[in-house]
Amino acid sequence: MSTIVNIEDVTFGYGDTAAVEDVSLSIDEGEFLGLIGPNGSGKTTLLHLMLGLREPDTGSITLFGEPAHRFDAGERIGYVGQRASDRGDAMPVTVRETVLMGRFARAGHARLTDEDREIAAEAMATVDVDDLADRRVSALSGGQRQRVFIARALASEADILALDEPTVGIDADSRDRFYDLLDDLNAAGMTIVLIEHDIGVLTKHVDTVACINVELYHHGDTVSFLESDALTDAYGRASGILAHNHP
Amino acid sequence: MSADQQVEADPQVDGNSTGDATSGRGPSIREGAELVGIGLVGVLAAGMLAFIALDWLRAAPGAVGSVAESWFAGVLTLGAWADFYLGTNVFRHPFVWRAAATGVLIGIVGPVVGAFLVHRQMALIGETLAHTAFAGVAFGMLFVALGAGLAGGAVALFGSSGTLLLVALVVSATSALGLQWLTDRTDSYGDVPIAIVLTGSFAVGTLVISWSRDFVSIAIDIEDFLFGSLAIVTATGARLVALLSVVVVALVIYNYKQFLFITFDERAASVARLNVDRYNALLIVMTATVVVGAMQILGVILVAGLLVIPVAAASQVARSFRETLYLSVLVGQVAVLGGLAVSIGASLPPGGSIIVIAIGVYLVAVAVSDRSTSLSMH
């Protein structure tokens, strides 16, 4: 089984404030990793480092064997952010247009082909939004909308799916359906990294947990995480750094 | 169907009910009408580009020049006949044709660039760049007036008004990049650097004009640039707009997918390894050039309206982003052609006429769309 992401002794800071310190962990192909930690603990920063959006101050990160920040096959990474991170509320964009964006990295400046449209249609069918294809994204419920973003990642034929608190502000039923969908994708072989603040939901779905608060407090399977004191330790440190303001 | 599916199904109903009620024939008729409209705009634009080309080629030596001259005269003769039948005194004048050509072209590129700006929540960038263009016009006046050396060469090549616009273009594009640099490097909210550059460039513009007035005498009326005027659209100005329109439309077609993705979801676009900074810079420089072109007719103060209002109107009723682009261009054309007609017919300023018509269309779009209630739900 090959390693998708490998993080070695990574430190990253905003100015003088360390956001991530001496973190080492790796993600294997087919793994479902949950990242947990208090607000401002550096989880999002760590995810951005893994995806190559930022370069570590020290240490190294590889993505598919290449330094993450120099990795340029963007279509191999699917990304779903928090609900409010896109312009879907006011921008007139249809579900189909959104899912087709998953083909853009592959197509570059060339025209989209029928094959691109077919792959996007299959992706919509997989996440059960094909009957919504011509609707504006603004007309969808929160749960439907996040499934559309999963479809966009599937359309790009991504090998790793990165999700940053994807179900914030989404009702419980839709959230359960969303995580069941992630389970299905993972069972079909998709590697997934998920940031989620709800410990119950997280441990129910993921295989391994990385608990961080600037430093890595625990990295291992879900059972060992629940038996450890990592959560108390990590959240205990939170009071000291909550004021630190990171994006 | 399970209970949670029911829950999820609800928002669709009020979100887009009209679209689905007519999902059989409705959309295809609508799409067809839009495509016909866009086709007509394309034909109109091609005709106007041909007119500007003829106007330019008249000065060419030899046979090309004389053929262009006779065709150009032919167009004006057609205009004179139109005047004869309509009882007007409009279409026989070359300046009217230049203004109309410029209007049609900016009525396309303004909304096209605006569609991305508006949905990036950068609507005020157009206004800011228009103010920097005003500073550019002020520097341009000084540059032309100084006359010697480089300025003299430029004036010989492009004429004094052409040089003025070129200087405005360079200043505006440079300030656009400076503004982006400032926004990236300051800790304040995104609109603070915008307010600073907007007022700052106007301040510099007024200082330069007042200072140079003492020793420079120029025939250009600064009021024309503030409020727009058909009379300041020269052959060179029209040519500049023709060139920038072709370039901007080509760039948008070539980079459509990238602009769409970045506009919709910048983070996901950068994960997909789109060069977000480069496309942002390209968009902002395109905006600066469109603003300088459109400023001639609309004036510094009103030019941003042409980038924003047609898009706002289209976004109310459009079902997709592509449809938003098409409808924005159509609204832009209605506003520009209607505004020019009102302006010429009633001797009113073109900028105000165009913007008031565009706002009229916007209000109609708000009234007929079922979107406003569903938007406020979020």
Image: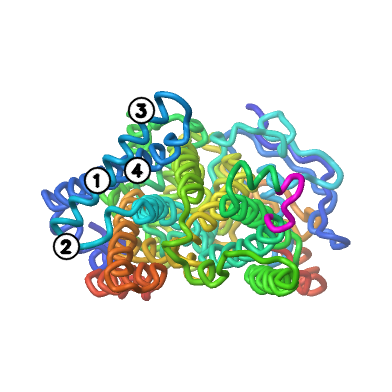
Q: Quadrant of the C terminus of chain A?
A: bottom right
Q: Which label number is shown at residue B87?
A: 2
Q: Position of residue B249 (x, y in %)?
A: 44, 43
Give the distance between the C-alpha atoms of the residues marked 1 and 4, in whole angstroms: 58 Å
* Magenta region: B144-151
> Looking at the picture, which amino acid does disc 3 mark?
Glu
- The foreground one among B318 and B180 is B180
Are marks 4 and 3 in one subunit? Answer: yes
Whether the magenta-drawn stretch holds residue B2 is answered as no
Q: Residues within 10 Å of mark 3 (few under 14, many from 20)?
A: few
**Residue, disc 1:** B77
Q: Earlier in the sequence, mark 4 or mark 3?
A: 3
Give the distance between the C-alpha atoms of the residues marked 3 and 2, in whole angstroms: 58 Å
Which chain is disc 4 placed on? Answer: A
Q: Compared to B191, does B185 lie above or below?
A: above
Give the distance between the C-alpha atoms of the residues marked 1 and 2, in whole angstroms: 15 Å
> Looking at the picture, which amino acid does disc 2 mark?
Gly
Does the CB distance between marks 4 and 3 fall below 8 Å? no
Q: Position of residue B63 (x, y in %)?
A: 40, 24
Whether the magenta-drawn stretch holds residue B149 is answered as yes
> Looking at the picture, which amino acid does disc 1 mark?
Thr
